Amino acid sequence: MNLKNIPISLKIGILFFLLGLLLLSILLILLIPKIEKEQYNNALSQTEKMVLLTKTQMKIVTNYFKEYAYFEKKESKVEISTILEKIETKIPTSKENLLEELQKLNKKFNCQISLLENKKEILNLKNERVKEIFSFENIPFDNWYNIDNSNSQCPHYTYYLFKKNIANQQIQLTCSSYFHDNYKNIEENIKKIVQEGFSLSESIHKGKIYMMWINKNIKNEDLNKSLDTINNENNENFCVSKISNYRLPKSGELTIKDILNVNETSNIKHNIDNQPTLTWISNIDENEKRKFVLVMSAYEEDFKNNLNNQITKILPLSILALMISVLFGYFLFKRWIKNIETLSNTAKEICLGKLNFRSNVKGNDDIGILGVAFDSMLDKIENNIKTLDLEVANRTELLTNSLKAKELLLQEIHHRVKNNLSLTINFIKLQKFKIKDKNIIEALTNIENRVYTMALLHTKLYESKNLDCIDFEDYVKQLIFDIKSTFEENQEISITIDIKNIFFNIEQAIPCGLIINETVVNALKYAFPTKKGELIVRLQKNENEYLLEIKDNGIGLNENFELENLNSLGLNLVNSITTIQLNGSFEIKNDRGTHLIIRF
């Protein structure tokens, strides 16, 4: 058959058919491998994002409940100690009243209480939370002593021991670390959050996800063992959390050493059951004894099967669209060109940022369907952007609320510490009224001033808008004003404070406040026998250090004094605070008075 005699419509049809075959070949040879690679990398990226998202969520929740547990225990121990001190101040009291007070304490806290008289037990109040008996022989008085006899890496409660002498009687307390029955379980609270994160990866792979605590002090000979081969009797080496979707971990060639070496988040390739496997390990929390990690393992075959499914869905649609184009290309040729230009112009406008621009190409043919699909895709993109913006706003609000809650908790802590220190000051004042020995009164006054120094700092932090930053000038002015008011009114001592734009956190403010308290009190006591003089307190910041100077024009120290041989408790305390807490240097000069120079 002569090709010249073939109708033009058939030639165009054959041309479209050959072009379609060429495009299909290019798709099979070039595009599909590229798409597979991009989708594979996208699946890995999406999985890693899920791991990081879950890690971030768990870090926030875990840190919150760790802080809650810490302060709940601290507050309970302080409250118990205060109750026992109140019982002690009521002596003499009847045994009936003492029994009643101890029974109240036993009901309020998860503590077993024993009362001994002349080393004989006369009372034993049990508690179902306390299941062990301990010896109090080597336990110091009036101090809490923690005992943990369990080698399990799973969360468990420990015991706190406390004993106190009241007259000829001894009170012994054995308390569960869960002082109250309303103790919040971290696993139960984060289970829902973690399971939601796990569900994000189900459409990509069928991997196994574990949350576990791992012993950091595993024997060297066990470090190169896997999770499924190491002896883990009584969970002594690791413990899988109840929120994991599998309870028996399987790590194949992945060793415990590999898991412990991960600091943040890492993706490790290895084999499980002789199959190539990808494992994401993310370090969530750790202390000196154990690590809390997220381990997610999935076979590489799962990712590839997911890619094949995607290609299987795309390829038939592509072939179908291609064949329709070949069959109807001739009849829609002119309109096709026009509509293609419209779609091209629409794409250009979208690239320029006009997301509300639409092609409005409609029809029942391929180009019409493509135009409608293109516009629909643009609608979805625009809606997804709005949804994403809304999601970002919601997540931002959640994080803001979480931050506010933590700030509120920190503010409440400063408030409680301030109240406890104020209560301590009042106890000291009460003791001073009962004592006539001037040396003891002076010692109690010194203690009272030191406690007040810390109480005033917590008061300033509680009243401050920024809970981690205090105006040190304002704090020192208030501190020195209160110190000076405790001395004789007829003193004519001028105190100059030179502190400008210095803001400290609590770790710097407390040591500096104690140093200023000790040196100013010493100066007002001993430096001015004539009740007249001048005292200068100066704090300034140089390039990489702070310089604190306290200088007076009083009688000064002995000419042959040596800092190492001074018997002054105050100066020794200042020296210890400077060198140990501030990592600084301490220097004393006799310069027409006493001149203290502290650098830190």
Image: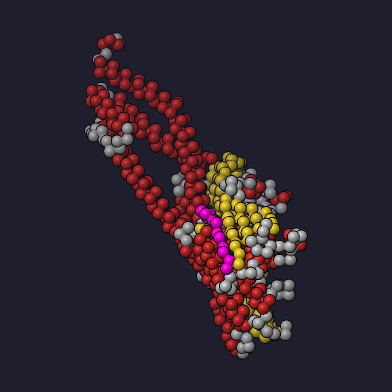
Magenta stretch, overall SS: strand
Camera sees residue 300: yes
Question: Left of 373 or right of it: where is 53?
Answer: right
Residue nearer the viewer, 496 or 323:
496
Q: Is residue 495 magenta?
A: yes
| Image-quadrant location for residue 523 | bottom right
Q: How many marks?
A: 0
The location of residue 17, given as percent across then percent down, is 33, 22
Q: Position of residue 48 (x, y in %)?
A: 50, 44
Q: Nearer the viewer, residue 125 or 138?
A: 138
**Residue at left offset 23%, top offset 34%:** 360
Colouring scheme applied when the structure was drawn = secondary structure
273, above or below 559, in the image: above
Tell me, yes or no, if residue 151 can be seen here: no
* 105 left or right, relative to 33: right
Please tell me whether residue 407 is drawn above or below residue 177 in the rendered image.
above
Residue 288: image x %, image y %? Answer: 65, 56
The magenta segment: 492-504
Q: Could you say which quadrant of the image residue 268 lies in? A: top right
Quadrant where the N terminus is found in the figure: top left
* In this view, 129 is above or below 23: below
**Residue 4, percent from left and from top:** 28, 10
Residue 551 lies within the magenta run: no
Depth check: give the residue in front, 141 or 334.
Answer: 141
- The residue located at (51%, 53%) in the rendering is 501
Please give the name of the residue rendered at 63% of the width and 88% of the height, measured from the top-left corner. 92
Residue in the picture at 65% in, 74% down: 442
Which quadrant of the view contains residue 436? bottom right
